[in-house]
Image: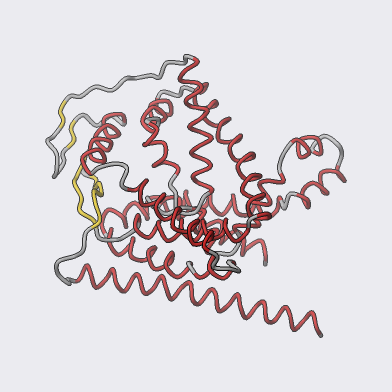
Amino acid sequence: MQIIVNLLRGFAIGIANIIPGVSGGTVALMLGIYQRLINAIGALGSDTLKAMTSGKEAILNEIRRTDAAFLAALTAGAGMAILASARLMGYLLENYHDPTYGFFFGLVAASLVVPWRLIKSLAPGNILSCLLAIALVVGLTLAMSGEERLHAAQKKALIKGTTTVDSGAASATHGSTVGTSIATDPKNMLLFFAAGVIAICAMILPGISGSFMLLLMGVYFDLLICINERQILMLAIFAAGAATGLLVFTRFLNYLLQKHGDATMSFMLGLVLGSLYAIWPFKSFGMVAGRRVDIANIMPDSFTANEGMTLLACLGGLLLVIIFMAIEKRQKASARCDDTA
């Protein structure tokens, strides 16, 4: 039964990673498994590699120590979600953008209660930590102007082989050219390694998009080119950076949660609060290669069927989280009764 629950948790995290602006870390925090996930990833290391060559008993002990069954179920669930729902989510975002974002806005808004419950004190330092996190997420969201987002989308379309792009807010680009390969010089190798580290750290933190960090670093399109051109060496260097960041940053984050729990959880709360700005459902937009590109948050100037559907979807997201929290509360109460019986 627990395996099925963890598969579903992983499925939810996988779906979140498909939605622009929604962080898998936010969903893990919402589901109440963030600390366990950080602990499990942080437990991986050289001891794990050593145990893999030390016999069956050592392997079984290492699986228990690293909570490997939990990690494997989450990974499998996330993978299944990406494979099963990528096209569906793409369709929903293209055709029902506002209601889809409204649903996730409701989910994330309701999930604020999770980090809030874990904060023991509203000390000034904790409040400041929360405000800094909000400023960080909102600042990152505003770091690219609308024109820069449209230009980035045009460049992405060109890299993927689209020769003509059109934008409602910018002039069309025709016949532009993009480099067909990335130089494998030491400077680019170091940049790709650092990008892997930073991207995975962003993905672990609630409210921050790893792909958006790659855009800010100017590496996102270079990475796309490497994927298209099968530049295995550069992709391997990026993956090595991501693996290094995952192992090192999770240990650091786990240390902060253990030693400075309130301040760290307050920061997490701020990240989730800030992410509400990023996933606000109503946005101005342009079109590039037949795809929508969000530009800026707006307030709707009328209440039409779209706004009604978005409001209902938001309420549905809120209600879903409340139901799951009620079920979890009942399960915990039942477990306590069994322990005292």
Residue at far front of view: 124
Residue 181 location, x and y as percent?
Answer: 38, 19
Q: Is residue 306 above or below residue 220?
A: below
To which quarter of the image does residue 31 belong?
bottom right
Horizontal arrangement in the rendering, residue 90 relative to residue 114 (left or right): left
Classify the position of the N terminus by image quarter: bottom right
Please give the count of numbered marks on the rendered protein.
0
How is the model colour-coded?
secondary structure
Q: Residue at x 35, y 48 (%)?
A: 139
Horizontal arrangement in the rendering, residue 182 relative to residue 26 (left or right): left
Q: Residue at x 60, y 36 (%)?
A: 243
Classify the position of the C terminus by image quarter: bottom right
Residue 337 location, x and y as percent?
Answer: 74, 84
> Foreground residue, 317 or 133?
133
Q: Residue at x 44, y 57 (%)?
A: 131
Residue 170 location, x and y as percent?
Answer: 14, 39
> Foreground residue, 156 or 270?
270
Horizontal arrangement in the rendering, residue 43 relative to residue 215 (left or right): right
> Foreground residue, 146 or 40?
146
Q: Is residue 23 above or below residue 124?
A: above
Horizontal arrangement in the rendering, residue 33 relative to residue 338 (left or right): left
Q: Is residue 163 above or below residue 186?
A: below
To which quarter of the image does residue 166 belong?
top left
Residue 130 location, x and y as percent?
Answer: 48, 59
Q: Is residue 203 above or below residue 177?
A: below
Q: Residue at x 51, y 56 (%)?
A: 267
